[in-house]
Image (cartoon, helix red, strand yellow):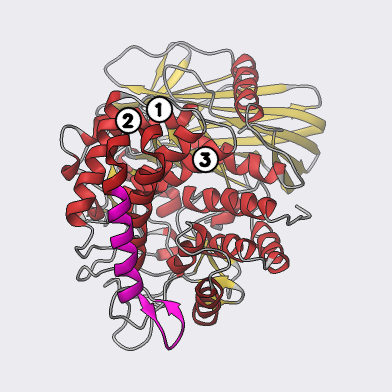
Amino acid sequence: MARIEDYALIGDRKTAALVSRDGRIDWLCVPRFDSGAAFAALIGNDENGFWSLRPVEPLQATRVYRDRTLTLETIVEARGGSVKITDVMPLGTSHPHVVRRVEGLLGTVAMQMCLRARFDYGSLRPALERNDDAYVVVAGPSAMALRSSVALAIDAGDLTARFSVSAGECVTFDLVAHHSWRSLPEAIDVDRAIAESDRAWREWVDAGDLAGPYADTLRRSLLTLKALTYEPTGAIVAAPTTSLPESIGGARNWDYRYCWLRDAALTLEAFTKTGHTEEAGAWRDWLGRAFAGDVSQTQILYSIDGDRRIVESELDWLTGYENSKPVRVGNAAYNQRQLDIYGEVIDALTEAAKRGLATTARSSAAVAGLIDFLERVWREPDNGIWEIRSEPRHFVYSKVSAWRAFDDGARYGELLGIDGHASKCGALRDAVRADIEANGWDPQRRTFVQSYGSDRLDATALLLVTSGFLAPDDPRSASTIAAVERDLLHDGFMRRYRTDGPGGSVDGVGGDEGVFLACSFWLVSARAIVGRVGEARELFERLVGLCNDVGLLSEEYDPVARRMVGNFPQAFTHEALVAAAIALEAAGGQTTV
């Protein structure tokens, strides 16, 4: 199996596929992000489904995204010549399509194609039959149809093709997913679909407000974040994958194909701060529907259409990525309490309102309800931002996020449509601050700790600086950053917290994990804010240097094995990259990216 960083993302804002350097699609869920996978070799083996398209005798390959798009182009030098393979999931189609186009560049190249569909995460071997101009694979309600400009054959349940492409010639494949009981979707014009998708991606990203020496890096992260939005509802998934391990061979393998309120809120801040407010409006409307009639029912995550129950289970027929088990679908964290989400949501809506997004009666009522609810519960323990599976605690960052919610209500109540709450929010803000300073500060080490009464540190302490809870010139900003660096830096990158030490990890999971890339970008932002711009710039460039050849980052990084780990690509990481770049620019830091 390819390394995580050897994959590129293609998507249509309904679902996404991962394409490896050697022309394999090893992951695709249809018809949407959180559906069962039809190609699941990524977290299993070849018997669990893949789609390969490559020269019979490849020599070397290079790839790029077409400028300011999500269209992947791979140039493959092979015995006999070279070809360009274009992979795209066209936008705006009624059904999910995966289009693959082979163009001869030089000489004549012998090619081979193999499509092995296995629905329900690789467990179901489908029926395969010819239907008019397409070959159709069917298993229960699920079906996919493949059309091609070259002859296809059925070989032991696989769809295969062998053909040659000479310079100037072109071969196309169009795979479309549909419900098995409905009519076969009509064929699309492949070249037109690619061109229209390219135009749509470029128009969107060019509408943003980007400048400076690292604008291209920001564009790629923003395009990645946009690809993780679910167009029909406005939800935003944390990642398009499940169970890519945080440590190879370990058990920290989670399903991220859902909408976490925190991750989505931070993604929206990345959008709004770079000139994109349409997504904030769509997510605000999704949020209003998900909240229903009582904000006390708010969950930390939902399905992409707003369903509340996301039962976690294990798929024991899958071997896991590089034998990292268990493979999980669903996420039991949906029934946890994480107090930080209320502050993240209110802050995202505040930022959008400051950028010109009009409030609605429903959004104003939601913010007012969230503040009233937070007033009742902010003193209670919770599971924290890292979703611990042990006893709830009084996490410092959860309290800071409550402080920020009340601060937003006090300062921007009129923008949020809750100006009558300003006085109450101001008093609550002051009460929360006093509580944090009394219980979350370690005067001996001069740092804020992970939770009240604990001696452990947490990378979220950096967010006390970036959120404005601590002023840049407050001595506690510098000393907290320094303490976190001493305790959590590993090979120059940040851990979330220590998973070792007396009593084991606070999270109740066990095992180890890589360094957390979002936390490392938080350190960039914190350093920049307190004036350590040179160090911030150096770390930023080192982190951006971890991006794979097409600009994507996973959740974590293993600095010993020097490889990406965790779900991929990760929204949390890319939004933190955007925030770090903005912090560097505000501090006057120049990069060479």
Distance (Cα) linking label 3 and label 2: 17 Å
Marks 3/1 in contact by CB < 8 Å: the verdict is no
Q: Neighbour class for label 3 at 10 Å: few (<14), some, many (≥20)?
A: many
Identify the residue at horizontal 44%, vertical 25% (top origin): 96
The residue pinned by badge 2 equals 286
**Which residue is more in the foreground, 80 or 497?**
497
The residue pinned by badge 3 equals 225
Q: Which amino acid, mark 1?
A: Ala
Question: Is 224 left or right of 389, judged from the image as shown?
Answer: right
Q: Neighbour class for label 1 at 10 Å: few (<14), some, many (≥20)?
A: some
Q: Is residue 127 above or below residue 492?
A: above
Marks 1/2 in contact by CB < 8 Å: the verdict is yes
Q: Which amino acid, mark 2?
A: Trp
Identify the residue at horizontal 34%, vertical 49% (top origin): 405
Question: Is 154 left or right of 578, judged from the image as shown?
Answer: left
- Nearest to viewer (mark 3 / mark 2): 2
Residue 4 place in picture, x, y as percent: 54, 56
- Let me know if residue 432 is in the magenta part: yes
Res. 395 visible in picture = no
Identify the mark nearer the N-term, 3 or 2: 3
Describe the element under mark 3 as helix, strand or loop: helix
Residue 78 is tagged as none
Please report the bounds of the magenta region as a residue range. Answer: 425-448
- Let me know if residue 490 is in the magenta part: no
